[in-house]
Image: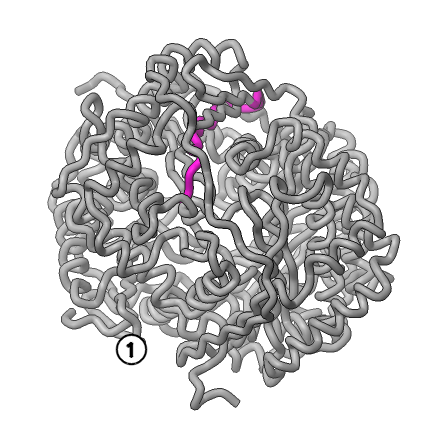
Amino acid sequence: MNMPLVNPPAQSTVNVRELVSPRGVRFWLVEDYAVPLVSLEFAFRGGAAQDPAGKAGAATLLSGLLDEGAGDLDSQAFQQALDEKAIEISFHCERDHIGGRMRTLARHLDRAGELLRLAVNAPRLDETPFERVREQMNAQLRHEANDPSAMAGRSWRARVFPGHAYGLPTNGTLDSLAAIERGELKGLAHRLITRGALHIGVVGAIDEARAAKLVDEAFADLPASGDLSEVAEAPFAGLGGIEVVDLDVPQSTIRFGRPALMRQDPDYIASIVLAHVLGGGTGLSSRLFREVREKRGLAYSVSASISSFDHASYLYGGTTTKKERADESLAVIAAQILDMAHGGLSEDELEKGKKYLVGSYPLRFDTSAKIAGQLVHIQLEGHGPTWLVERNLRVAAVTMADARRTAERVFGDGALSVVVVGRPEKV
Amino acid sequence: MTSPHSEPHLDAAAPGSARPAAGSGVVDFRLDNGLTVVVIPDRRAPVVTHMVWYRNGSADDPLGKSGIAHFLEHLMFKGTKAHPQGEFSLHIAEIGGQENAFTGNDYTAYYQRVAKEHLGAMMEFEADRMTGLVLTDEIVAPERDVVLEERRMHCDADPNAQLSEAVQATLFTHHPYGTPIIGWGHEIESLSRADALAYYARFYTPENAILIVAGDTDAEEVRRLAELHYGKISPRGAAPERHRPQEPQPVARRLVVVNDEKVEQPSWQRCYLAPSHRTGAPGESETLDVLAHLLGGGQTSLLYRKLVLEDKLAVAAGAYYMGSAFDETRFYLYAMPVHGVSLNELDAAVDRVLASFMADGAEGAALERAKTRLVADAIYAQDSQATLARWYGAALATGQTIRDVQEWPERVEATSAQSVLAAARKWLDRRRAVTGFLLPAEDQAA
């Protein structure tokens, strides 16, 4: 019982250094010369939660325009410049950050740095690409307007976070996108794209001096700080209710969840282990997979995990099952969650869950782009470079007492907030 | 904007057929029982990707038993005499590994990604289930329900998927590529334990399999472990031959239309019957790779520039070519109209772009950009052992050789403006193609 069954190595396989450039830009670096390429990932804390009122999708639209022309290069000239050297630069927007990534062959690093500098510092946000990218977002919204899985996710977030930015779609709505004016995006860029909000990971065939030059070139001239709106903590609503969204399809698509622990909570890591036991991994190790798919053949996919943001954290899961058996699937899921709440977790499950989480961590670091992404992700979660080692030590240290206490805190009375898209026969 | 053809888990082969460069350390050999082995060393992280590919996919499903290759893929996780009831999966989960499997038209593959010290254990389990599978009706029946739910989720509830199935079924009038990988619902319903076991006995043999190990290992270690675990399996004679009925020369341009009330954004696609790497003349599939990139690879491609940027008829447009196929394959074009533009207008505009391309050919600078990009892809691929393993596996399982994979960048470089133009004129002939329209319900259609 007291024998530690999980022994993570005390050092990481990735050698990361936290550095500061001559002009004061902080970045994390992993040098690796096995393949002649360089990956860089960066993020500015902010993101879709900063969309102006009534303009959901604005930050996502902005991110879609940053590679659509910069400096004296219009959209097509910028894209051709990337293509000529097979340089990849792209941007994306999440709830709490807006970010981007660059990948280049090491021999084209100079040109890649110039183009990245332009995109970050001098995006043109021209009228023509603005209209085009907005229309592309509109088309995507129409494309998924009656897609059960997209509908279920949208409805669920709106249900649990009414009146909060987290309840709104990051891609906006047809109405909110139509309300966005191009001039506003310039203002949004000034608020969001600043040195103060920036986190960077650099990986690949590049040494410290060259990496420092690259980040200085791309980021040192940005304004020191922006003007982020205060985002309130998001209260969780709708527990204990089921909302049915009508759609004439043979299956019912179910999304469920309940509030969970914030990242800063001392029991957060234990909650990750519990969620993994409940509905993580790709198969038989997950209780929901065993009960819903393996034993009863109710669904092809079923899962649950903790979704953690700067101002909310929740357990979120889903499945898709035939409409005649939607009630049965929901009952099986609810029973498993209640069992976890009532101390049903076994020592064997806990140890196996911990072993999986510890053992699979290195698989997140097996390509340059994935490593760069992890370096930024770890920074956004508020950790230092030691997290690469500490994370597994923390998982391994979760005891049965921790797990029991955390199960009570996370699963509580087992109440869920549920959305079902389709025409379930009973629920 | 993503293409309308993606099918997670059901593997429609990697879009395009870009493959890695050099792969200098790649070693291949054969065990005495006929098993092909490929080793792709990558020492950067202490992990390995262990894959077994079988040279049979949905195109080898017996008549009336569509979906059996994919159904068996599911059943392969049900346990053996030596390791019953999910022991393999639970062991992988316990060591923090990942596993999955996928079925394509021409192959079925199983893989695990684990810390390097577990390679031998993965081989032991995987070799065991090459011959030791145990199936009962109690196991088969609920899993068939799972597959039916999978089909309902990915196909029956999704008009995009319905259109893709209709286009493929129309393009291939005779060859089994026209049947969905997952199978038709009414045939899946009747697949039995006996069907699964008969299929398993026929195809799951060492001669028919390819073992690929990528990661922190070397040829010597892989040979030793492979001989220990896979070498025990008795040879079964020759690998099954893949004789599928071939397509006749196509003569009819075809249009298929799916109307569905769930559709709010119409979309357009066209699929041409084209040679694969195996069936084409030397260099022909590389030329089609370049052609697909010129026409529809990203924002500087011809279709995107003309239809999206200049004419403002589309919000998305692109092309790709599926060169890794055992038999004649597909060259795709796709587009999504701007709100208010009809699919007939879009269809005509695509044909205008193709006609002008076939008159004028590619600009020299555009051709150079396309080649630069494709050759760079081969270097980028070396950053991912999982990608490399998958590319080598898909190539070998569709009749290519290691050398074909390694020399791909050179053959891309050798592609000329004339050969690209000739390929476009020869293969992008509407008589070889099916066009698909996805539209709202008829009474809603404008």
Q: Is residue B99 above or below residue A52?
A: above
| Callout 1: SS | strand
Residue B219 quadrant: top right
Task: Identify the residue shown where x is 45% and y is 66%.
Answer: B166
Q: Hey, which residue is sitting farthest front in the picture?
A: B248
In the image, taking residue B295 as reference, residue A278 lies left or right, namely left
Q: Amino acid at mark 1?
A: Asp
- Identify the residue under disc 1: A246
* Image location of residue B124, percent across then percent down: 33, 19
* Image location of residue B276, percent across then percent down: 61, 46
In the image, taking residue A321 as reference, residue B356 lies left or right, namely right
Query: Is residue A72 magenta-colored?
Result: no
Other-residue count near label 1 (Cα within 10 Å), few / some / many at <14 / 14–19 / ≥20: few
Q: Is residue A29 above or below residue A61?
A: above
* Image location of residue B96, percent across then percent down: 36, 29
Task: Identify the residue shown where x is 61% and y is 43%.
Answer: B279
